[in-house]
Amino acid sequence: MFTRFLLFSTTLATISAAPAPIARPGDNLLRTVHSVAVGSDSVRLAAGIAEAERFAAAGRMADAWRAYRKIISQELDEGEYPSAVMWRLANAYYGDGNELDAARELDRLADAASNFGDPEMELRARFEAAVIYSRHHEPARVATHIQRVRALLKSPVIDERTRQSISARLVK
């Protein structure tokens, strides 16, 4: 019992401690910080994702897609950025062989990332969509995406590992 209390107290002290600053006042470096709020919205989000995953595991892909789209719609209506859910929906489409639906969802994700100021996600989504479009012989879409990918690769806010990973896969 004492051990459980000690563990709980230590955890509580860690949670309630003041957050460490993410930058010194003189730093001019901008970083995207994703915070996770714990509350009814996050519980609703987690429940929705769990439901979609249960549908997918049971082979009920149309229900899974519908559940993901419902979450995305709710999040966007509330002014939130549902990047993880949009990525999951694209993966669900892709995993079921609906590559063009996956590419279209990646397009929507890239647009949302651009609107919400997440250039790294925009880069990843546009690149993966371009790969899919290239397999489906859609050169106009590929060219549009690759043009934006090349611009994003020059951005100083893109993580070096992401830049190297995509650059290595990009045909020169």
Image: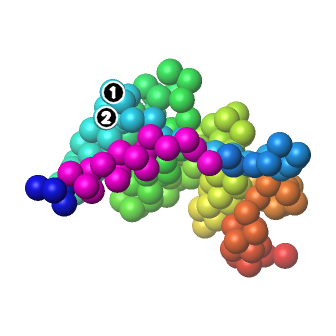
Horizontal and vertical percent position of residue 122:
68, 49
The front one of 54 and 1 is: 1
Tell me where residue 79 appears, x and y as whole percent.
Answer: 56, 24
Q: Where, by quadrant of the figure, is residue 67 drawn?
A: top left
Side of 137 where 68 appears, left or right? left
Q: Quadrant of residue 150?
A: bottom right
Residue pictured at 39% horizontal, 62% vertical: 95
Q: Quadrant of the N terminus?
A: bottom left
Q: Is residue 51 left or right of residue 138?
A: left
Residue ID for mark 1: 40
Q: Secondary structure at mark 2?
A: helix
User: Which secondary structure lies at badge 1?
Assistant: helix
Residue closest to the eye, 68 or 132: 68
Say if 36 sits above or below 150 in the image.
Answer: above
The answer to which quarter of the image holds residue 49 is: top left
> x, y percentage for residue 162?
69, 67
- Crowding at mark 2 (Cα within 10 Å: few <14, some 14-19, many 20+): few
Farthest residue in the front direction? 2
Task: State whether residue 120 appears in this view.
Answer: yes
Q: Which secondary structure class fits the magenta region best?
A: helix
Location of the C terminus (image quadrant): bottom right
Please say whether residue 11 is one of the residues in the magenta stretch. Answer: yes
Give the Cα distance between marks 2 and 1.
Answer: 5 Å
Mark 2 is on which residue type? Answer: Val
Most foreground residue, 15 or 118: 15
For image coordinates 59% across by 40% down, the residue present is: 108
Question: What segment carries the magenta color?
Answer: 5-20
Task: Pick the residue in front: 138 or 15.
Answer: 15
What's the amino acid at mark 1?
Ser
Q: Are marks 2 and 1 in contact (CB under 8 Å)?
A: yes
Residue 43 marker: 2
